[in-house]
Amino acid sequence: MNRKNLTQLPPDLPVPVDDHTADHLCGMTFPPIELQTTNGATFRLDGAGGRQTVLFFYPKIGHPDRPLPGGDDYWTSLPGARGCTPQACVYGELYGEFAKQGIDVYGIATQDLAEQAEAVGRLHLPYPLISDPGLLVAKALRMPTFTVDDTPMYKRLTMMLQGNLIEHVFYPVFPPDQDAHEVLEWLARGKDGGKWTGNFSSGGFGRP
């Protein structure tokens, strides 16, 4: 069986455009909901105090031996769909940089907990993934989603949270393998003594 190499982004990957469906998120409070994580704990932010968290939403981490949703060619043709594996892996490579700053990292998708746990083990991720098959966060925050093969999924989006307050949103995220680098750059430019001193804003670094 030919195994797909999902760690590399294909050339000429279509670029997602900002549809402004995330413009309202900055300054909102993350909902007081509980979600299961791959480390056996419960993810809940309303009791997080002032701790900072990077929460990146993604459609689906594929498996090298299984077809991608809608077929490999179709999935690759969808702007913003392909690239979950390299995105997750780069967060793993840079996890120590976030940990040194006391920042938690989580990835979240609608995949069930077993699929998320398999991805953590196969990709050797040092941080947990969250399962939200019911789109509880999307419904509470009116987040951008899309559907393939009758399965709703999150569009790729990254939040920076201070406690349960959404202080910055990166959307659209492209290319996916630069997401973690972009977040670290944003943190480096906006921090003073470990506290974010800028204004609430949306869009990735360098975008209006």
Image: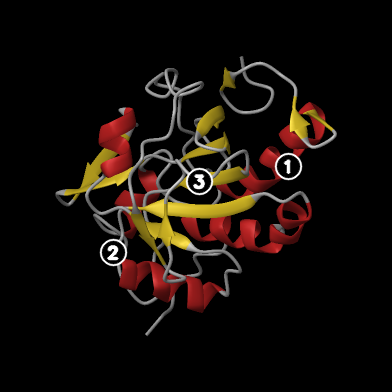
Asked if the residue at tag 3 contacts the one at tag 2, i.e. Cβ–Cβ closer than 8 Å, the answer is: no
Q: Is residue 31 left or right of residue 28?
A: left
The residue depicted at 22 percent of the width and 43 percent of the height is: 147
What is the basis of the colouring in this image? secondary structure
The three-letter amino acid code for the residue at tag 2 is: Asp
Q: Label for residue 56?
A: 3
Q: Label for residue 151?
A: none
Q: Secondary structure at mark 3?
A: strand
What is the C-alpha distance between the residues marked 1 and 3?
13 Å
* Lower position in the chain sequence, tag 2 or tag 3: 3
Question: Outermost residue toward the right?
Answer: 193
What is the C-alpha distance between the residues marked 2 and 3?
16 Å
* Lower position in the chain sequence, tag 1 or tag 2: 2
Asked if the residue at tag 2 contacts the one at tag 1, i.e. Cβ–Cβ closer than 8 Å, the answer is: no
Quarter of the image where the C terminus is located: top right
The residue carrying pointer 3 sits among few (fewer than 14), some (14 to 19) or many (20 or more) residues within 10 Å by Cα, namely many
The three-letter amino acid code for the residue at tag 3 is: Phe
> Would you name the residue on which mark 2 appears?
112
Q: Is residue 176 left or right of residue 39?
A: right
Quarter of the image where the N terminus is located: bottom left
The three-letter amino acid code for the residue at tag 1 is: Leu
* Lower position in the chain sequence, tag 1 or tag 3: 3
Q: Position of residue 105 (x, y in %)?
A: 58, 53
Q: Is 34 rendered above or below residue 139?
A: below
The residue depicted at 36 percent of the width and 36 percent of the height is: 31
> Would you name the residue on which mark 1 appears?
184
